[in-house]
Image: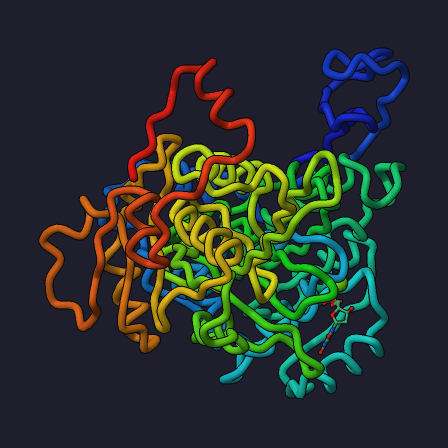
Amino acid sequence: MAKDKTRYVCQQCGYLSSAYLGRCPSCQSWESFSEERQKAKPNNKTSERAALIEPRPLSLVPNQETIRLKTGIIELDRVLGGGLTPGGVILLSGEPGVGKSTLLLQAAAGAAQEGRKLLYVTGEESAAQVRSRAERLKLDPDVLWVLAHYCLPDIEEQIEKGDWDVLAVDSIQTLQIPQLGSPAGSPVQIRECASRLIALAKAKAVPLWLVGHITKDGQIAGPKLLEHLVDTVLYFEGERDRPLRILRSFKNRFGSINEAGIFEMTGTGLGQVLNPSAFFLAERPKLASGSVVASIMEGCRPLLLEIQALVSPSPLAIPRRQTLGVDQARVGLLAAVLEKKVRLRLFDRDIFVNVTGGAKVGEPAADLAVAAAIASSWLDKPIAEETVVIGEVGLAGEVRSVGRLKERLKEAERMGFTRAIAPLLETKGLMGLNLEVQGTPNLARFLAQNFGFLGGRMAKGDKERERENGDGDYPI
Ligand code: TYD
Ligand code: MG
């Protein structure tokens, strides 16, 4: 019979050693090792192990890809690459309060339909709290089994005993192995608890969800420590005071990482936003100056968003460039290009830019729309109705290609837009669209065509500056 093993774990960094060490060779801390007994695995019979370590032709390896357990939440299943896989481990991380437990409970109940048995282990809430949350979410309480406990060896015993189809642990930071001596949430506990649970899930070929909290700057060690141990890392993001939530995959051994699921937090749990463009454009004012519709790619999906800008005379020596949902430096850059290349006087104006609905734009493909919104507000002229604006803006004022233009235009067409403005080079040879596409080579042409603006008058002092610098080249 195999013997129990003793090993020593550094409580600071998790370094493992077979002998006691006074100083950790990894993190250099003194007297940080504590003893830990590892139980010999009872089912590791020599014959079984021998069978496992024998090479086999790939064709004889069972294809688990075909077995997908749907959660019934379309947005989530898509991000997962089709659903849960047997023995697949998913780390669901996000800031506290973003809605991880809610999503997990909804997903768990979905997967537990059709007679599947799900165990929801919670170290954060009592069983009664989970029950009242399930009622609020209108979930069937009969399909969910709950275990409100934090001691890992007991939890393992219950997992071993039952015949579970899905396991969910909320959260990994609350679990503890008392023998380790360190507090719950410490790196050693997190790593040990997670690796034991993962080994159990793999051995039983049961999908396992792990919830991990992170702080705003992603600092807490937990989820970062686990990323390489799990198969899928999902990150749930959103602002607490807004309903929008976006679920992204950062790592996925069973699917693409370019997927994003969009949800809305409501009074009765998370709702799926199956038509995100309609969601973001719902309250768009018609023919308002400073409002422009952009098209960005959210994962593999094109998405239409409204970008709003407000330009007003600044009482300050250094005017403000304030943004919400767009990078402030990018707006500063676009303002400088507008000033230099089309003579839009902005150096004494405050500029505020906002992406409505709480969405964030990280793609340069929204540059032209941001510049258009600023110009539209400055000129107090709206852009033509039902127009979507797409393009990256370079420092020379040129409008550059963005990639996947056709998909973006198709989405605009689907949403009832009749006109699109896009980078000139990319629009050549576009066919099969029910949409008038105007190709634009640069900002100057864009402003001339859409606002009838032919370049601003020179600001006071500009002439002198120009004479000194020797650059007076304006396209129009
Ligand atoms: P929760 O899932 O507990 O977040 P996490 O597990 O990530 O810490 O959800 C937190 C917030 O969601 C909480 O502030 C209340 C809100 N909420 C709703 O708005 N509607 C609901 O139906 C539920 C269950 C929660
Ligand atoms: Mg929670």
- The residue closer to the viewer here, 5 or 415, is 415
Residue 328 quadrant: top right
Q: Quadrant of the N terminus?
A: top right
Name the residue rendered at 40%, 55% in the picture: 296
Residue 217 quadrant: top right
For the question of whether residue 196 can be seen, the reply is no
Q: Position of residue 449 (x, y in %)?
A: 28, 56
Q: Classify residue 270 as left or right of residue 296.
A: right
Q: Where 179 falls versus 162 (above or below)? A: above
Name the residue rendered at 48%, 56% in the picture: 379
Name the residue rendered at 45%, 48% in the picture: 371
Q: Where 271 falls versus 376 (above or below)? A: below
- The residue closer to the viewer here, 147 or 332, is 332
Q: What is the basis of the colouring in this image?
A: rainbow
Name the residue rendered at 61%, 67% in the picture: 244
Q: Classify residue 274 as left or right of residue 192.
A: left
